[in-house]
Image (tube, helix red, strand yellow):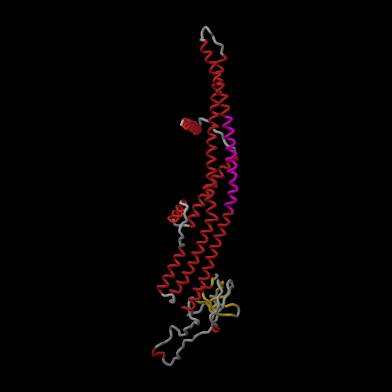
Amino acid sequence: MDFNVKKLASGAGLFFTRAVQFTEEKLGQAEKTELDAHFENLISRADCTKNWTEKIYRQTEVLLQPNPSSRIEEFLYEKLDRKAPARDTNAELLGQYMQEAANEFGPNAPYGSTLIKVGECERRLGAAEREFLQTSAISFLTPLRNFLEGDWKTISKERRLLENLRLDLDASKARLKKAKVAEAKAACEGEMAPDFQETRPRNYVLSASASALWSEEVEKAEQELRMAQTEFDRQAEVTRLLLEGISSTHVNHLRCLHEFVEAQATYYKQCHLHMQELQKELGRSSIRLRLPNAFTLNTTPSNAVTGPAAEGIDTVETDTLTIEEVQAPATGTRKAKVLYDYDAADSSELSLLADELITVYTVPGMDSDWLIGERGNQKGKVPVTYLELLS
């Protein structure tokens, strides 16, 4: 019990001494041991690394999981060391709802069959998103969190210890300085020869005794200063090594960043491929469901005479033009880039290859979803959804 009380009293005294030293430094009443410029640069670099790593980590969490409630739930499961329950992504839920709706509307109906196709694509997108989230959490988020919760906490602890030892060192320096001033003052008083007629011998004896006491105090302060300096230097070296390890942290985070970018690129590539396949499939469906295989032109003039006055005048009939009879207009033709391969359904259509350039134009009375395409001597209808019109 006595030991604990003494230890508590010693700790309280040390805390009070540090508080006094810290306060006097802030008020400009005490000197402060400054670290060298290289050490200060290391501290500044470490603080910058911590601050930006924390911001990047938080924003990456928001990117991967925009729902704050879900993030809190995952955090609680992690702290409780329990596995979070599996949760469908938003795309997977959308795909599920679309497929359920298709069953209600009729899977063989045009709308229902399209819902099934889009729903399957959304589920594939959701699966790709799930894989991306898992990969990013392991390869990018986890290393950042390990730095913030592991390495940085160790660095912060050693820096706090270094700061406490610096306060002890500066307090020892101040104590030694005061002891030397008092010793010098006592020595000056002791050098004055006593006048036994006017001064009592007792004052001279007390002065000599005070000088000896202050000499002992100086020796004690010097010994404490040497111990404080040794502990400070040892802790400064430990802290310096930890701070220099920030360079290794940057190298590790750089590797993790490359892995994150690779995972993100793979995810977006998969999404792009899934959407391209869906576009092609929907394009074929729209051709089968809505678009004719041939187009007709009504050659009856809009201002043709009708009624009795038209008697004796030959009636102009409606003719169906073939592709060979269509002529390119003098103006209005454009270049177009083919986005996807397209196989012609009949002789009136033109087969296409992805990335090739063709000339396109329209003719009066033609469905707006189709254009006439020309490639050399070949000519035929092409779907607009497969083209990128160039200026």
Image coordinates for residue 68, horizontal then vertical, percent: 44, 55
Q: Is residue 306 visible?
A: yes
* Image vertical order of residue 152 relative to residue 324, above or below: above
> In the image shown, does 329 or 362 lie closer to the viewer?
362
**Residues drawn in magenta:** 225-254
The outermost residue toward the top is: 197
Q: Is residue 23 visible?
A: no
Prevailing SS of the magenta stretch: helix
Q: Position of residue 139 (x, y in %)?
A: 55, 56
Residue that extends furthest to the left in the rendered view of this protein:
308
**Relative vertical location of residue 70 with respect to residue 354 in this rendering, above or below:** above
Instruction: Give the position of the C terminus as an image quadrant.
Output: bottom right
Q: Residue 144 at x, y = what percent?
A: 53, 51
Name the residue rendered at 56%, 17% in the picture: 188
Say which residue appears at 52% left-offset and 56% top-offset. 137
Magenta region includes residue 226: yes
Is residue 333 placed above or below 183 in the rendered structure?
Answer: below
The answer to whether residue 64 is left or right of residue 227 is left
- Which residue is painted at 42% across and 67% down in the image? 97
Is-magenta flag for residue 357? no
